[in-house]
Every structure is written in C-alpha cells, then in structure tokens.
Image (cartoon, rainbow, N blue to C red):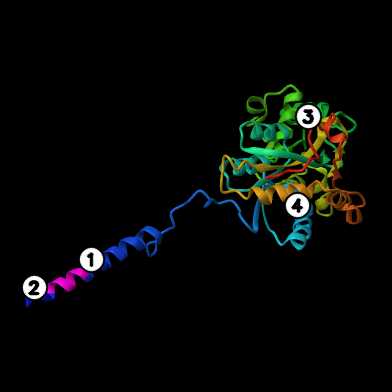
C-alpha cells in the first residue's frame, strides 16, 4: 500500500519541477529585472524617438515647435533631452538616444569618425554674438571677435574695473566655440584662461541661465543669437560684437549608428532627419521667431550653398536608416 501511494506523489512532484524550470527559462522572477536583450536599450524604439540636443535650441522655443508639428504629422513621440553639445554627443556614444541635434562641427566630426554617428545633415545656422554691458568697460566695440577676446583677457587679468567674462563652462557647442576664440587670440585655455582670477567665471549651465548670470554680474559672455533674442526682455546686456566669420554657428542632425547600438530607433531617426531636410520644414525653421522678435532666429541651409565654405556640410540627400 505504501508503495502504491508514493509513486503518484513522486510523479506529481517531478511534473511540477519540470513546469517550474520551464517557467524560469521564459519569465521573470518576482521582483526581478528582465534580462537585457539586443533590443533592450535606453534609447527609443517603435513610436518613441529620443533626441539629445542643445539648450540653445530649447531656449529659443524651436524644439517645442518642431515637436508639435512632427508629432501631429506622424504620431511619433519625440523626447528631447536638452543639454550641452558635448553631453549630447556622449549620450549618442553610449546609445542612450537615437540621434543628436547639435552645433559643434569638430565634436560632430569626431563622433562620426569614431563610428558612433552616421548620416550627418546640417540643418540651419545663425551666429554667436559677444554680449556685454552697454557701457562696454573693456572697450571692445567695433573689434573683430579675436581682437575682442584679446582685449577682454588683458583687461580682465589687469583687474580693469567692471571687466568680467562669464563662460558656459559645460563643454557645449557655445563653450567649444569660446575655447576656439581664446586659442585664436593666442591663449591656451587650460593654462592661461581657467583659474586666472575673478574676471573669468564658469557658469556650468545652459545658455539661458548663463545669460541671466552674466546679466546679474554685468559681464561679457558668448551667446548664440537666437537664445539672446529670446531672453532679451529679461536682460540689460547688449550685443557688442555681432559680426565675424569666427562667430558662425551651424546646427546639424546626426543619427546614432545601429551597428554600434543595435537597439536604437534607426528607422525613426532617419525619418526625422529626412523631415528636417524637406523644403517645408526648412521654410518653417527659416520663419521661426520672425513675428515675435522682428527677425528669424535661424537661417536654413540649402544645397549647393551648404557644401561650400564656410559651411562645408551636407544638407540634402535621403537617409535610409
């Protein structure tokens, strides 16, 4: 009798163990995390497109307009992460986003050369401007941008009253352009600009916040023109230097390479870049801000002009993803 009772019980236990093992191979343990697969990444997918971009584009309001129009047309959920260009490109290198929308040509080229970015398309441009107190304590009005930076440095390091320069200090596109200007002025940024006294202040913030800080300190700063115009009603700072080839500010969209990060939404990135480069979207970008600020905040790029100096980029051609 004992033998006959034990056999069915053992069989039932064996079956239950087999079922439990099978469930463990296909499911997730209670309270546990799903095992990552090739398509499980922090970046977008399907109906979500994650875009790392610059605070200057956010501050101008252009991102909100692009998001509104594109989502209404396609149903795609655009998720912008606004930060400095250097941080945005780092997000692309990690595969945290599907594409970057940035404005630092040297950093962009390195991103592509290293194999993390593909299909770059320049979209539009405006100019950086050097803004400062209307009194212009360093006396830089009517100088070239490089001459202005030399003069600010000499006045600042000689403790000229009222001469302060506020830097983004965040490895953004604007900060990188500032470093280029210091280099063109003949100074090593790391040894001759940083930590050289109270005249040079690092904000470590986005463009809008940097402008507010510079305004509080009545200091000079480098800003993209679009953000300055969108903040002008909150500032007493004025454009002091607004001309010069060194102040060109070009914006580009670059998809993250799916060969490096298989989980990115490569198809969505390609479709968005193609939409950005249509004549209709470029017209919208070219008109943005004109009614509110009396002039457009951006100038769209068209072929063949974009392929020629000073732009030297590709602004047309379908991206396939």
Tell me the residue that label 2 is attached to: 3
Residue nearer the viewer, 180 or 73? 73
* Nearer mark to the viewer, of 2 and 1: 2
Tell me: residue 12, above or below residue 232: below
Residue that mark 3 sits on: 149
C-alpha span from label 3 to label 4: 25 Å
User: Reading the chain from its start, which is encountered first: label 4 or label 1?
Assistant: 1
Query: Crowdedness of circle 1 by 10 Å Cα count: few (<14), some, many (20+)?
Result: few
Callout 2: SS: helix
Circle 1 — which element? helix
Q: Earlier in the sequence, mark 2 or mark 3?
A: 2
Q: Which residues are magenta?
A: 6-11
Q: What residue is drawn where x is 7% and y is 78%?
A: 1
Please report contact status of discs 2 and 3: CB closer than 8 Å, yes or no. Answer: no
Image coordinates for residue 214, horizontal then vertical, percent:
75, 44
Q: Which residue is mark 4?
A: 59
Q: Is residue 296 above or below residue 153?
A: below
Give the CA separation, mark 1 to mark 3: 80 Å
- Numbered circle sitting on residue 94: none
Mark 1 or mark 3, which has the lower sequence index?
A: 1
Left or right of 23? Residue 284 is right
On screen, residue 79 versus residue 20, left or right, reads right
Task: Say whether residue 10 is magenta.
Answer: yes
Q: Is residue 273 visible?
A: yes
Measured as percent of width and height from the top left, residue 130 is found at 81, 38
Tell me which secondary structure the magenta stretch mostly adopts: helix
User: Which sits earlier in the primary sequence, circle 4 or circle 2?
Assistant: 2
Identify the residue position indicated by label 1 in the image. 14
Marks 2 and 3, how far apart at CA: 96 Å
């Amino acid at each position: 009798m004992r033998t006959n009772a034990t056999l069915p019980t053992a069989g039932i236990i064996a079956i239950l163990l087999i079922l439990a093992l099978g469930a463990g191979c296909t499911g997730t343990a209670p309270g546990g995390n799903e095992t990552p697969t090739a398509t499980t990444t922090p970046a977008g997918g399907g109906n979500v497109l994650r875009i790392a971009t610059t605070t200057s584009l956010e501050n101008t309001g252009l991102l909100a307009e692009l998001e509104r129009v594109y989502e209404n047309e396609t149903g795609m959920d655009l998720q912008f992460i606004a930060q400095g260009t250097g941080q945005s490109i780092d997000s692309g290198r990690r595969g945290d986003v599907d594409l970057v929308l940035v404005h630092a040509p040297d950093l962009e080229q390195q991103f592509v050369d290293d194999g993390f970015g593909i299909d770059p398309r320049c979209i539009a441009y405006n100019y950086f401007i050097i803004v400062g107190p209307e009194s212009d304590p360093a006396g830089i009005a009517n100088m070239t941008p490089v001459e202005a930076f030399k003069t600010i440095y000499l006045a600042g390091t000689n403790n000229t009253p009222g001469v302060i320069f506020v830097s983004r200090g965040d490895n953004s596109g604007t900060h990188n352009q500032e470093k280029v200007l210091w280099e063109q002025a003949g100074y090593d940024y790391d040894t001759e600009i940083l930590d050289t006294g109270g005249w040079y202040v690092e904000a470590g913030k986005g463009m809008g916040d940097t402008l507010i800080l510079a305004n509080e300190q009545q200091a000079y700063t480098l800003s993209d023109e679009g953000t300055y115009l969108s903040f002008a009603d909150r500032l007493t700072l004025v454009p002091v230097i607004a001309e010069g080839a060194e102040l060109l500010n070009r914006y580009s969209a670059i998809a993250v390479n799916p060969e490096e990060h298989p989980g990115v939404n490569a198809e969505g990135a390609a479709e968005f870049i193609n939409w950005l480069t249509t004549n209709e979207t470029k017209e919208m970008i070219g008109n943005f801000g004109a009614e509110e600020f009396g002039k457009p905040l951006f100038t769209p790029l068209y072929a063949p002009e974009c392929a020629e100096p000073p732009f030297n980029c590709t602004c047309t051609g379908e991206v396939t993803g």
